[in-house]
Amino acid sequence: MSNFFQNFIDPAFWYSVLRVSTPLLFAVMAALVSSISGSINIGIEGMMLMAAFWGNVVGAFVKNPWIGLVAGVASAMAMSLLLAFSHLKLRVNLVIAGVALNLFGSGFTVFMLFALTGEKGTSASLGSQPIPRLDIPLLRDIPFLGKVLNNHNALTYLALISIFLVDYLIRKTPLGMRMRAVGENPDAATSVGVSVLRVKYLSLLLSGVFAGFAGAFLSMGYVSWFARDMTSGRGFIALAAQALGGNSAILGALGALLFGIAEATGFTLQSLRIPSEITNMIPFILTLVVLIIYARTRVRSHSRIQKI
Amino acid sequence: MKRSLALLELVRMALTILIALLIGYVFLLFSTKDVAEAFKWFLYGPLSSQRRFVEFLNNSVPLIMTGLALSLVFQARVFNIGAEGCLFFGGFGAMLAALEFPQLSVLHLIVTLLTAALFGAIWAFVPAILKAKWKASELVSSLMMNYIAYLLVLFLVNNYFRDKAAGALVSYRFPQTAWLATLTRYRLNSGFFIAVSVAILIGFLLYFTKYGYEIRVVGANKKFGFYTGINVVVTTFWVQLLAGALAGLAGGIELTAMYRRFVWQSLPGYGFDGIIVAILARNNPFLVIPSALFIAYLRVGANIMSRMMGLAPEVVIVIQSVMILLVTAEALLERFKKRIVEREAMKGE
């Protein structure tokens, strides 16, 4: 047991927290930029899968991880355009469209994987082109923090930067202002000349970009192959983390880190011979708990106004 | 006017299926040289032999049940898509009852199936109570419950009920008293008749009883329901429990009839297929039967194609997702609908 607690002052633990939090950070940003303009993006999971698949496969074929990354993000954007088109133009219920997109991502990637490699499990046989890790000279030499922050995948740094970019976008730019206006009151936004449709398209597309990075990291950083359904619920966990943080990118990122800590703790417990099925449950159970806490605070603040 | 609107609905449905199949065809183009042959097996496979026809009927059994479960929650406008987890946990419940109570003899099968339904309902209880008490999003919580069911059941089965003599990761064999009969030499799942009767029963409940009416009112307009004295919270709560029980029963039927062990090492996907079954049926329990048969036909067709041609049957999931998008697209062919309504309105003047 002392082993277990020692673990939390070990820089290696916090390093792994950042590593497992990376896809969640991106996914939370994806959830945030769409929810801020009033559309909940259930399809993040499917977009991530798509990006993970195309990122890895294209990267392996052209032997260049960066082109793979672009392909992965582009595929997720295509998915988000499909979602936006279905919802905004064909008027499919957004939740149903998201569910359909997730199904599509899952089926499509397995089908293509099999067509390309003859295997249904992983793409390991294609060879891998992981995105490089960055060794940052000055950071390396700081005692504790150096071991935590240095030598991460390039995308991990991008994830950390994107928290502040999204925060800035939402709070300080005219576009972010319009996004919030559309989310809060579309009629009011229309009355002052904001095109609700265009803003919603844009924010869903942006959501696709972040989901793309999240997925690409999974198959080109977290591990260096694509495995079927490898997102394993991260897209949904991100929705819960985003709900926890409300409209704030910083709080949402903290939520993602909380889940990262839970996941990393699970790995520690596994090394103490607790079965992996049990430790893998931790993030999902935590999501339920978070959902309850979030819903409780919300109900309390609303209860005086509305009874239904 | 009602008739021409129904006709339009049919046209839409046909168009949707056609487009979805076309997209499936395009996908096959990329993965095989002999597309015509592959597509032939896909569309005609389930009819090509008696054995395959029975396989197709058997496949529809869990789909009818999960389709019913999702129709119920969708009717009440609750997005609880935890049928997959309920089915998995229900299957686990069936295994428990089958292995632990063999002394029940005549009642054993009934107890086993009831336990499956009970376990399904227990699993649905969590998202339902979270929704009722704190209005927590049932969509996210039910999805989380799917993952938890999967991990928990796998842990329990593989550690405590695993038949080490079986040579695969499966549970001990159920005693014969807990077997649901299979008919003919091609092993037709007699659960088919249970599923069809349950569908009719649920249809009756939904369209001919007070409770069903309440469910539909809650789904159509929550506020109206509230002001007419329906307890909206209680109704949505029970609807989810009932749906969970149906999904759990689906798991029980599948295991006691087809496998007679707990055999699943991954989520079987029937709960997710139930979504498209319910959507195609427009959440009408009576229509769930043909809708589930149709999806089962596609699934079995894809399986046969993959066996004959060495392709991945997952193409059927792609086709299904396209169908979900097109069937629920309110704007599709809307212009025609408007024209019909307008013409009728002019006639009235």
Image: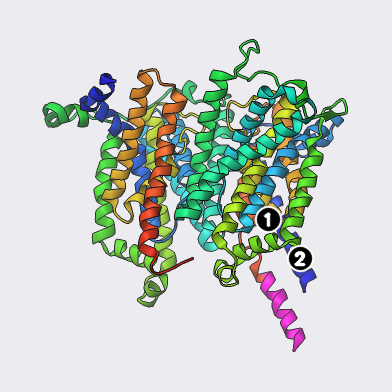
Q: Is residue B43 visible?
A: yes
Q: Earlier in the sequence, mark 1 or mark 2?
A: 2
Q: Residues within 10 Å of mark 2 (few under 14, many from 20)?
A: few
Q: Answer above or below: position of B87 versus B347.
A: above
Which chain does the numbered disc 1 sit on?
Answer: B
From the top left corner, tell me how far across and down residue A123 is, in percent: 49, 26
Query: Where does the magenta region start and end?
Result: B336-349
Q: Nearer the viewer, residue A229 or B224?
A: B224
Which chain does the numbered disc 2 sit on?
Answer: B
The residue most toward the top is: B165
The circle on residue B283 is 1
For badge 2, the amino acid type reads: Ala
Reading the image, the residue beneath label 2 is B6
The residue most toward the bottom is: B349
Q: Is residue A209 visible?
A: no
Q: Is B59 within the magenta?
A: no
From the top left corner, tell me how far across and down residue B229 is, in percent: 59, 69
Q: Is B348 within the magenta?
A: yes
> What residue is shown at x 75% (from left), y 28% (from top)?
B108
Task: Give the structural element (helix, strand or loop) at label 2.
Answer: helix
> What residue is shown at x 73% (from left), y 52% (from top)?
B202
